[in-house]
Amino acid sequence: MKISVIGCGYLGAVHAAAMADLGHDVIGIDVDAARVEVLAAGHPPFYEPGLPALLARAGASGRLRFSTDIADAAGASVHFVAVGTPQRSDGNGADLTFLNAAVDALLPHLAPGDLVVGKSTVPVGTAADLLPRIATTGASLAWNPEFLREGHAIADTLIPDRIVYGLVRPADETLLDEVYAGALAADVPKIVTDLATAELVKVAANAFLATKISFINAMAEVAEATGADVTQLADALGHDERIGRRFLGAGLGFGGGCLPKDIRAFMARADELGVDQALGFLGEVDAINNRRRDRLVDVVLEEFGGSVAGRRIAVLGLAFKPDSDDVRDSPALDVAVRLAGLGAEVTATDPQAVQTSLRRHPQLRYATCVGAAVTDAEAVLVLTEWREYRELDPAAVGMLASSKLVVDGRNCLDRDEWVAAGWRYRALGRPAAGPARVAAPALVEA
Ligand code: UGA
């Protein structure tokens, strides 16, 4: 099948490569010439495990090409629209500029019988607004939300948990079944809905995930006030199959290019629809999430007697989550920047996200490895749970640091192991452990 993918960001690039891998003939289109150039050369412009190999395989098959010219979409029978829908700069709603521009640019190249398939995350009602414009060409519109997680994008695209088709023309189901024949043969559940329901499935899923994370982080606040341990609480709750342990990871909370902006856009849309009360709780979800960052900074301040000015602090982890170089709304990077803003001498590192962080915050000091970051540090903060940080040897880190204070921002370290190696251990939602800190004398300005 001939397929075009308009917008080759995270979602589109992975989707285009995956579709080509499944045997389709794919043209990926993006307005960003630099992006198109690197993708065509087989180098993704972001870090995603497995994507370079997938691009290489798809490129070698001759079934995947990239272009900046939307006219190259002509001739495809299915056109996926996968452009970004970021938060508006003047409010909480979604900015649909890229989506409208992509659809308008595509219109002259559509032929009767073509199917435009929206994959971008949009406010409910967007597809209904686009439909009349697309219908003038004789093409049809479907909404087919994407649920891929960064770091697991390829597996999530090839074998997703479910496939949702929001349709206006029942016959389009057959066309989409052809696109997704591989996944359907692997028994991936398919749900066929109208346009509005398909749009809602995506934002409702992200709202639920964000709520689950903020729920456990709210419990962390209660745990901090009572001496309880939120990680044990989550384990115990998670054994209840109705609740489940996934996304009950208490810590610094959610970030990235999706959950934070999606819950805000959802609230903004509910406001427009007059059902703002129904989603009022998402404001609380957002607030709980942001308070975790404040709390982590407070924990560090507590340990240093109220001021971090001049303190040498190592930050391990900058990406919004492991296996990604994405620092959009990253809680880790935010905390690093805040501590530096309070006068701390922060040295930050990340296995993949140093370059992306450097572009946003050139004022921070970066190290290329853990050893360089922790040498002489008075505190070590683990803010993104990369595997190599989870598996750090506390004795080895202790030989390099000047003081054994570790702050586990993701509840990802083996507390007992760190304490046994002589560290004072602090975390969010868990009692402090290890030797009480002998506060270093406050730094006095000469
Ligand atoms: C999220 C959804 O999980 C995907 O299904 C969706 O397709 C995607 O958004 C999107 O809308 O495009 P993603 O942003 O890649 O995917 O990351 P998640 O794995 O959902 O993690 C989001 C954030 O929540 C991260 O900052 C992570 O550290 C945090 N998190 C996750 C927690 O704080 N605790 C947890 O227990 C789990």
Image (tube, rainbow, N blue to C red):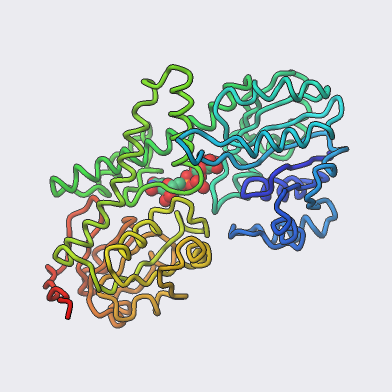
Is 443 placed left or right of 343 in the picture? left
Q: Is residue 200 above or below residue 404?
A: above
When asked about the image quadrant of residue 395, the answer is bottom left
Residue 107 horizontal/vertical position (percent): 79, 31
Q: Could you tell whether 137 is left or right of 244 in the image?
A: right
Q: Quadrant of residue 436?
A: bottom left
How many badges with numbers are in the image?
A: 0
Q: Quadrant of the C terminus?
A: bottom left
Residue at the spot 75% in from the left edge and 50% down from the top edge: 21
Image quadrant in which the N terminus is located:
top right
Above or below, comparing residue 301 to residue 376 in the picture: above
Q: Is 379 positioned to the left or the right of 329 in the image? A: left
- Along the line of sight, which residue is nearer the eye, 1 or 32? 32
Q: Position of residue 216 (x, y in %)?
A: 30, 41
Residue at left offset 71%, top offset 59%: 34
Q: Give whichever of 410, 85 is nearer the camera.
A: 85
- Measured from the top left, where is residue 51 in percent x and y? 65, 57
Name the residue: 64% across, 44% down.
157
Residue 222 x, y percent position in the rendering: 19, 42
